[in-house]
Image (spheres, coloured by chain):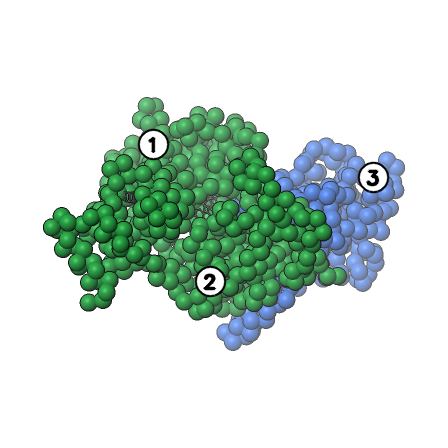
């Protein structure tokens, strides 16, 4: 028996006798996530985090204090009954744990991997508070992933008898998937329309394989198909058919718009049109969806064969782009971020993994211009150093440039990951819909838009947000659609 | 959906025209719009191609492409009955068609293909159509017959003088622009360098000139920014803001450099594919 197993065994015996005290729980070390070796993984695209063993999962679950007020639940955007599912894991009842999660979240294998737990459920966790260290909170996300991974194949929910009503879901991201599942369960005839040749949204073309294996997303899509949801790819709503066509001519009674973010932002500095400057979206789409990583080995999607790369930004997208560049063979990858590391919106685990993989962080620095050679190819990026000044609207201290602090980074590729505007196509082609000045669809608390029967959610409503928020809105919209269709 | 090829014809040494099943696109498309096609669903490039024509009743669209890289070579090897992995569209904003008066349509090389539906639509809107078609030599000239039908005047130029006038398209363009009254609009579609010089020709005479840009693309929905160009000092996305722009505002030099981004890799992919064709005996067919 290993040390951990022995510890667990002892704790479980104590538990049976009703003798486990809070002190015992605090003494259980927080379980580290097993991961692929940092050097080895630089040259493969396989998942980095390998998942808890059963012993680890139960030990981690035993760290939970079962707080009466369960502040973790408050921190969860979809209010998963965290305390209860963690208790079920401690008891070894994994199916029960999964069933509890699924009451509120349909994509636990995804969310367990990509949610920013440290600013959600784990931020408010009593254990983390006690140690004044959010890293010491109960690892709720890892536990969620553990039970989701144990149950491959997904559960097929019960489907109500046909209602004769048709629902169109536009976009197959997390919001669309959940909205499709929930409206299908109510017995409606549901079709998902996707612009790309593969469904899954950002989970397929944006988030890389090494962080979210595509097989997991595919499984969720397969579940939808088994439920009888139709999935139509290469269908661009607004162009192939408009929302008006779908409702007036094709007989759809309700529509969910989940087309996600679009129009990547650029910095508006000199040199951004040079060859070798990418938006992170393009870089990641080429490598993920179009498999540029297999160039010459089956794939013919070209991508820059970079030696030295600068990624600009500090979010998940920036981390993903930087780590992808490493895997595509770059020798040196810099991450240039304007604020301090504390302010980086990326998940802590990704920041940690990125550093382990040798990515060099340039904090409190920002590009001033990109330099090119006579062929128009990037040869360098000039940056300015910044310091933190007064807090801005977001409450974060505003970075201000230090005069005369310019310096050069020698790079052949620049990847810009500073966010997206809204996807413009639906706005261009749906005059009946109301948008705010940033191009996001305006919805009420039920995700209803200004157009009757049309609902919206996810990044097209929230601006660039998260998987769990998109999923939450997909659910709210589905409930509203089901209610709307039951009436008429 | 099957995206099956229902007919195929070779127009010149390296130019092919195919009809592909895509009923929804055939119904929705307007002049000036394009599709993004991919040979395989798992691997590979997504390439934009203008819709050269469509038959809504039959449910087919017509594409014209030039064999240049790996994907287009692969497409040239496909036959009637074969299917594409995916075809998505129609993309881009349709051409702004109205009665302008006299419209000069300038096509260069494969650019005649995207130009044709625009010229047809302009004709139908009651415009007088003066067409200039250019190519390197007689063999490479495509769609002459189609343009003859709709043009009030048709001028052909070749680089080597093997057919029509021995000249660049800008020469007759300049002459037409000097006529009185001068033309109301010029539409120029062809190699980037040709569009650039057409715009240089019409700029001093202040004749509005529309060009259709064929940048590298990925998604075609405004998500990736790979298709961006500078127009009037602002970054524009060809797939959602274009493909047609005011040619006098376009930064062609930047665009030409960006178009070369993958030249080396494309050659690699093509070489590997040629070798593979050789091995399986495709090139003997
Ligand atoms: C690289 C990257 C990393 C990220 N990492 C994380 C993370 O770690 N954790 C996290 O919580 N969030 C992360 N996010 C954000 C998260 O992925 C998004 O917030 C979420 O996917 C939004 O979901 P959605 O339902 O709005 O649809 P999306 O996932 O945005 O999908 C929209 C879909 O609609 C399709 N579409 C667009 N236009 C049309 C049209 N006209 N017709 C038909 N289909 C259309 C698109 O092709 C796409 O498939 C990341 C995002 C990126 C880009
Ligand atoms: S806050 Fe932390 S310790 Fe309390 S119930 Fe939630 S997970 Fe358990
Ligand atoms: S092709 Fe991606 S934004 Fe235009």
Vertical position of residue B159 compared to residue A263: above or below = below
Residue B73 at x, y percent in the picture: 58, 64
Residue at figure coordinates x 84%, y 49% from the top left: B172
- Mark 3 → mark 1, Cα distance in angstroms: 58 Å
In the rendered structure, find residue B206 and report the number of the disc placed on it: 3
- The label on residue A479 is 1
Indicate the quadrant containing the C terminus of chain B: top left, top right, bottom left or bottom right. bottom right
**C-alpha span from label 2 to label 1:** 43 Å
**Which chain identifier belongs to the blue chain?**
B
Foreground: disc 2 or disc 1: 2
Residue B284: mark in rendering: none
Q: Tell me residue A135's x, y (percent).
A: 38, 51
Query: Would residue A251 appear left or right of A308 to someone viewing this image?
Result: left
Q: Secondary structure at mark 2?
A: helix
Visible in this render: residue A354?
A: yes
Left or right: A268 as drawn, with respect to A55? right
Crowd band around label 1 with a 10 angstrom C-alpha radius: few (<14), some (14–19), many (20+): some
The residue to which callout 2 is attached is A356
């Amino acid at each position: 028996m290993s040390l951990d197993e022995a510890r667990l065994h002892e704790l479980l015996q104590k538990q049976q006798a009703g003798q486990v005290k809070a002190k015992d729980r605090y003494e259980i070390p927080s379980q580290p996530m097993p991961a692929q070796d940092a050097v080895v993984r630089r040259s493969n695209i396989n998942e980095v985090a390998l998942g808890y063993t059963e012993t680890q999962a139960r030990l981690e679950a035993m760290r939970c204090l079962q707080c009466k007020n369960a502040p973790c639940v408050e921190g969860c955007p979809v209010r998963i009954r965290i305390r209860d599912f963690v208790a079920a894991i401690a008891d070894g009842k994994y199916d029960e744990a999964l069933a509890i999660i699924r009451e509120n979240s349909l994509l636990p294998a995804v969310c367990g991997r990509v949610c920013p737990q440290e600013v959600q459920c784990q931020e408010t966790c009593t254990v983390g508070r006690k140690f004044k260290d959010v890293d010491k909170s109960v690892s709720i996300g890892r536990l969620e992933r553990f039970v989701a991974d144990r149950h491959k194949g997904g559960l097929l929910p019960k489907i109500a008898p046909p209602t004769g009503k048709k629902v169109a879901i536009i976009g197959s991201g997390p919001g669309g998937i959940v909205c499709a599942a929930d409206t299908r369960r109510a017995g409606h005839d549901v079709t998902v329309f996707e612009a790309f040749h593969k469904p899954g949204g950002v989970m397929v073309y944006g988030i890389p394989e090494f962080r979210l294996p595509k097989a997991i997303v595919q499984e969720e899509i397969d579940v939808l198909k088994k439920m009888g949801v139709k999935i139509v790819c290469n269908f661009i709503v607004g162009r192939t058919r408009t929302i008006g066509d779908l409702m007036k001519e094709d007989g759809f009674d309700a529509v969910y718009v989940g087309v996600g973010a679009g129009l990547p932002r650029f910095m508006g500095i000199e040199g951004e049109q040079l060859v070798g400057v990418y938006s992170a979206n393009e870089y990641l789409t080429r490598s993920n969806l179009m498999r540029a990583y297999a160039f010459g080995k089956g794939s013919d999607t070209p991508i820059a064969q970079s030696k030295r790369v600068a990624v600009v930004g500090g979010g998940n997208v920036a981390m993903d782009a930087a780590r992808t560049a490493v895997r595509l063979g770059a020798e040196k990858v810099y991450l240039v971020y304007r604020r301090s590391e504390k302010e980086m919106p990326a998940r802590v685990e990704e920041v940690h993994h990125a550093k382990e993989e040798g990515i060099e962080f340039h904090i409190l620095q920002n590009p001033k211009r990109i330099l090119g050679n006579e062929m128009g190819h990037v040869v360098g990026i000039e940056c300015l150093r910044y310091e933190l000044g007064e807090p801005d609207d977001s409450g974060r201290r505003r970075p201000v440039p230090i005069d005369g602090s310019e310096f050069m980074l020698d790079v052949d590729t620049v990847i810009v990951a500073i966010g997206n505007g809204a996807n413009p196509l639906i706005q261009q082609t749906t005059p009946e819909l109301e948008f705010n000045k940033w191009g996001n669809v305006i919805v009420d608390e039920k995700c209803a838009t200004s157009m009757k029967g049309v609902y919206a959610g996810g990044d097209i409503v929230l601006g660039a947000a998260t998987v769990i928020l998109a999923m939450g809105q997909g659910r709210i919209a589905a409930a509203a659609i089901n209610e709307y269709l039951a009436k008429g | 959906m099957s995206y099956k090829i229902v007919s195929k014809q070779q127009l010149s040494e390296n130019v092919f025209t195919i009809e592909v099943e895509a009923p929804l696109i055939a119904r929705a498309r307007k002049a000036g719009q394009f599709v993004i096609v991919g040979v395989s669903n798992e691997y590979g490039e997504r390439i934009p191609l203008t819709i050269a024509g469509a038959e809504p009743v039959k449910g087919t669209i017509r594409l014209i492409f030039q064999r240049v890289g790996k994907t287009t070579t692969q497409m040239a090897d496909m036959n009637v009955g074969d299917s594409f992995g995916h075809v998505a569209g129609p993309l881009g904003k349709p051409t702004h068609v109205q009665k302008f008066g006299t419209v000069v349509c300038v096509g260069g090389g494969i650019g005649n293909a995207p130009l044709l539906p625009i010229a047809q639509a302009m004709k139908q809107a009651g415009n007088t159509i003066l067409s200039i078609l250019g190519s390197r030599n007689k063999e490479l000239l495509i769609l002459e017959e189609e343009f003859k039908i709709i043009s009030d005047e048709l001028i052909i130029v070749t680089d080597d003088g093997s057919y029509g006038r021995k000249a660049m398209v800008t020469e007759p363009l300049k002459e037409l622009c000097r006529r009185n009254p001068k033309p109301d609009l010029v539409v120029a579609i062809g190699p980037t360098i040709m569009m650039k010089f057409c715009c240089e020709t019409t700029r001093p005479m202040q004749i509005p000139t529309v060009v259709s840009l064929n940048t590298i693309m990925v998604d075609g929905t405004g998500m990736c920014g790979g298709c961006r160009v500078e127009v009037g000092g602002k970054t524009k996305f060809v797939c959602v803001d274009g493909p047609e722009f005011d040619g006098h505002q376009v930064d062609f030099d930047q665009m030409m450099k960006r178009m070369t981004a993958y030249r080396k890799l494309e050659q690699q992919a093509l070489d590997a594919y040629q070798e593979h064709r050789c091995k399986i005996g495709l090139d003997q067919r």
